[in-house]
Amino acid sequence: MNHVKPREIVLKGISGSPGICIGKAYLVDREGVNIIERYSVSDAMVTKEVDRFKNAVARAKKEHARIIEALDKDVSETLNILETHMALFKDKMLYGKTIDTIKNEQINAEWALRKVSSQVKLMFQQVDDSYLQARANDIVQVSDKIMAYLLGTRDIKIADINKRVIIVAYDLSPVDASQIQLERIKGFVTDRGGKDSHTGIVAKSLKIPSVFGLGRATASINNDDILIVDGSAGLLIINPEEDTLFKYEGRLARFEAYRADIERESHLPAVTRDGVALNLMANIELVEDVVSAKDNGASGIGLFRTEFLYLDLERFPTEEEMLVKYKELAESMNPQPVTIRTLDINGDKFNPVIDPVEEANPSLGLRAVRFCLENEDIFITQIKAILRAAAFGNIKLLIPMISCMEELIQVKNIVRKAVMELERDDKVSNKDIPLGIMIEVPSAALMADELAREVDFFSIGTNDLVQYSMAIDRRNRRVAHLYQALNPAVLKMIKMIFDAAQKNNIEVVMCGEMAGDPINIPVLLGFGLKNLSMNAASIPVIKKMIRAMDLGKARKLSEDLFQFTTVREITRFIQEGFKDILPYRDTED
Amino acid sequence: MSLKTIVLNELGMHARPAAQIAKMAMNAEKNIWLSDGNNQADASSIIDILTLCAQKGSRIQIQAESSRDEAVLEQIKSFFDDGFGELTE
């Protein structure tokens, strides 16, 4: 393979998690399952590359014909599908276009095929017709078969990556991300997504420098290109010149020194300069994450996301299976609190095993508590496991996505039913555990006063609250820049929630990403926030800041803030007032 | 040269008939086009045919670029007229 002569390219994206890394590129394909290499093919080699593609199609077709022949002719439905596939192998829009792409773009057959089949698939999915949407799968199946012959034995799974590389992907779903051995990876960059996408959240917890929403990273990078990822500034530099490399090596050293400095202080208590003690807790998804939570000085688990066990098993776990995990978690943190959130499946945690219905707009669909109330047996199984585990530690029960009083009433009835069934069956449990709800839908924020009378605590999920308040899909690169936690409308809503909680004397925890971003801390503390939960890796930075902060000054700021009407003014106002304690940002010069 | 026809079967122009139309169109010397009045599809590509989303009752015009493809044109039209072999009495 002949590589094009490298030239320094700088791409601007959205800062995922801070830090700098320098390493070699490793391209992951769009679906995130197979590693598809992208490389250039020289003029002289294009014909050979086209032949290689034609050869792979011919072999895939031959194999397919054998399958059809061996098939019992009675199963005509299957036969129809397979015969349609047969014709798809040489369809102009797939076969012809892939050949054109190899020739015109001078790229390898695998990448060309992937590009063309993704386009066709997308075209089908965008049609408002369920029959055609389902045909997208036929395209995937046929192109996968061709791909298998193209790749031969070089079929690599994402789980096997173990080189110290920088991952370059179109997008990474939480499931893909959980397959990668991230501790062996230096950093990653994606075309899609934003700071608060699930991938970004995973990256942040692992302290891997990352940049998202680059738009055309996968199209501009070849495997083994040298990359610099500047997660703090949201920059990606491809094939850096020697000067650039030198400059960044210096920055890398300074950043690492800064991080080491912060971690040394992470075990000191989170007390403000004027003596107010706060709770800094960790958001986690796996029981194993307890180690990192403790290492970073967390004083509890403010949010345990329970979806991963479901996704991992690809079926609904039993009460006993969940109990084992929850009990282990409660015991390892005891006496510190662990807040367990019930199943919160949504669009990007989509799993065909759990929810086979395709929704046009999953984040507004049957997710979280809505799904659980429709599937009471699944819900009550989880609640029982939580109540039983609560006998072994300090557990709180948290219900996501409550949008109205009716849902809360239903939830409370189901909890009562769970308690009764456990008593009937003589199971050891703790029926007096605190019950809280996530306030993450604007309708719940507006009803905060009424809802507060019915529960023991609120947990503010800022990621969704911002998304739903402002009608911003935070995974959509084209609007992700509008996703702003410091928007005055969002701040007004958050203040409302605090006021309602204070009036009814209940606790508030903030567990969205907003609580882990230093710029937001003065306002939130000013509103009265005492319990913050965030990615474990963010705790040391936030703690250092809190220890230097004057709460009285923060209160004043949160009152004066509403004279401003734009995010820009508010941000500048905070930056000016707290310049001395906001963390150092190397790239702002 | 063109002929007009109508989609008669319940399911519309789905993948199986599309595959058969594509097979027929590949025997033509030049391109054969299917049009629903708004969009035009290459009759030799299943993918392209499917994007027309032709439901039962859709009016389709079949067009041949070469007059020597009359037989292919007729063959495709009669496949339409036969409801793609899916008509139930």
Image (cartoon, coloured by chain):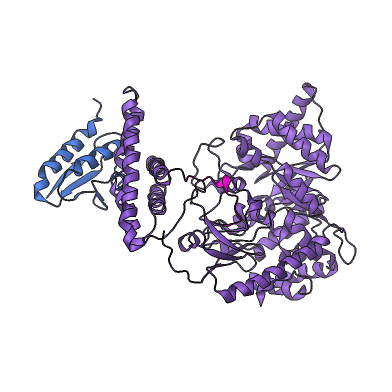
Reply above or below: A406 against A377: below
- Residue A98 rendering spot, x and y as whole percentages: 34, 52
Range drawn in magenta: A152-167
Residue A417 left/right relative to A266: left
Picture quarter with the C terminus of chain A: bottom right
Chain B tint as drawn: blue
Magenta span main SS: loop
- Residue A356 rendering spot, x and y as whole percentages: 51, 36
- Residue A265 rendering spot, x and y as whole percentages: 83, 61
Q: Residue at left 73%, top 29%?
A: A417
Q: Given the current orientation, which residue lies at the most extreme right position?
A: A275
Q: Which chain is purple?
A: A
Q: Residue at left 49%, top 41%?
A: A358
Reply above or below: A522 against A372: below
Q: Can residue A565 be seen in this view?
A: no
Residue A267 figure quarter: bottom right
